[in-house]
Image: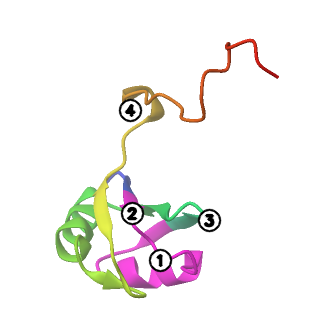
Amino acid sequence: MSSKKLYVGNLNYRTSDETLKQAFSAYGDVVSANVLQGRGFGFVEMASEEAADEARGRLNGTDLEGRKIIVNEARPKSERPREPRSGGDRDSGRY
């Protein structure tokens, strides 16, 4: 049995690791739950792929602390598309 990591987006900025863990533990053993504070997203690692798939299917689009959360399978950094950074041209020669 292998674990599976899920991405959880559109989180309330007040959501804690413990709140996230409690929400997902109804669907199986949670290995870890980490909210990136001030970013509105986090990651949950479930002990089994079956538990992760069940949690994703049941929790995606549901309300958690006043926000409809998005739950998807987490992708490794190398598989994510690169997005251009906002904030202007860094090589414009302006200080």
> Which residue is tagged 3?
38
Left or right: where does residue 20 sit relative to residue 25?
right
* Quadrant of the drawing holding the C terminus: top right
Badge 4 is on which residue?
80
Which amino acid type is marked by label 4? Arg
Image coordinates of residue 42 in percent, x first then y, are 49, 61
Gap in angstroms between the C-alphas marked 3 and 2: 14 Å
Residue 26 is at least partly visible in this image: no
Does the CB distance between marks 1 and 2 fall below 8 Å?
yes
Taking 73 as reference, is 57 above or below it? below
Element marked by disc 4: loop
Pointer 2: what residue?
8
Upstream in sequence: badge 1 or badge 3: 1
Q: Which mark is residue 68?
A: none
Q: Is residue 1 magenta?
A: no
Which mark sits nearer the N-terminus, 3 or 4? 3
Mark in the foreground, 3 or 4: 3
- Image mark for residue 20: 1
